[in-house]
Image (tube, grey):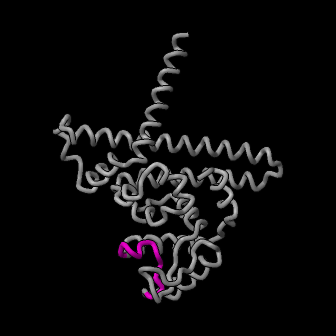
Amino acid sequence: MSYAEYISQLINCTPAELKGSEKASFLRLMELYNKNEGIHSYLWLKRHLPFSSEDEKLLSTLVDSNLVEVIHGGRFRRGGRNYALTTCGLFYILSENQVFSGILLSKYCENIILQLLLFQYLEEDTVKNLSPQAEILISDYLHRCCVTSKRTIETIRSSKISEDRERYLKILELELNAFAFCLGIRLTRMCSRYMAISKGRNPKHTDQLNHEEDKMLSLLVDDVRFTRFRRSVLKELDEAVEELARLKSE
């Protein structure tokens, strides 16, 4: 998965021009199904559920805006007409300052946005079981990445010089890597704290972990992708410390 491929798909997303009420209703509809839908239909808008006339009108607008697509049939949806977020729709909602559940994010684990920004660092099962604290942390990270990507895309669209586009793309890659590095540090701190508690080195703080945190962090410890990511982050930190020590000694 390359940054060039990531941008090439997002640059084809026409900026959505939802009115204030439409935008609020779109986010409300996502939140409604985020709370009420079962695991098999999570984040899928199911037509056979009771929609108001306003919701029907909104869905039509979202389809026309390429934010939502119609899904016919499917393993768990035979005979129904259902809806799912498109890449543009996912990019749109991630650009909003919202908190998204791990189950929501895991349902779109094959999308290029989350493949590049999240699932190269974490396995699907870990994301699916995120604790509330981790959901806030990761939602903020994704929001920052998408807002920065959106700004870069607007700049690229306005540029007519191919060399400038390549430069902007490289800058974006550096920025997204910096955001990922910060995420890695925060997750590493959570993981290290959990490992200390689980090994009994800090027993007086064991009550600070609830069941959701315990489950998520135990998955994080065994997450192969995160282990690789964590080692990379720690290596960069060590190199930074060595470089600072060298500069001070000169």
121 or 194, which is in the foreground?
A: 121
In magenta stretch: residue 46: yes
Residue occupying image coordinates x 44% and y 83%:
77
Residue 187 horizontal/vertical position (percent): 39, 44
Image check: 134 left or right of 3?
left
Magenta segment includes 160: no
- Answer with left or right where residue 66 lies relative to residue 190: right
Q: Is residue 242 above or below residue 205?
A: above
- Position above or below: 23 against 223: below
Identified at 59% across, 70% down, the residue is 20
> Which picture quadrant has residue 166?
top right
Q: From what the image shows, is residue 177 above or below residue 103? A: above
Is the C terminus in the top left, top right, bottom left or bottom right quadrant? top right
Q: Position of residue 78 (x, y in %)?
A: 45, 86
At horizontal 50% and vertical 69% (from top left) the residue drawn is: 27
Q: Which residues are magenta?
A: 38-48
Total numbered badges shown on the rendered structure: 0
Q: Residue at x 32, y 51 (%)?
A: 219
Residue sitting at the far right: 160
Quadrant hosting residue 111: bottom right
Question: Horizontal and vertical percent for residue 228?
Answer: 43, 42
Side (left or right) of 187 relative to 201: right
Instruction: Give residue 127's position: percent from left, percent from top.
Output: 40, 57
Q: Of 235 and 175, which appears nearest the observer?
A: 235
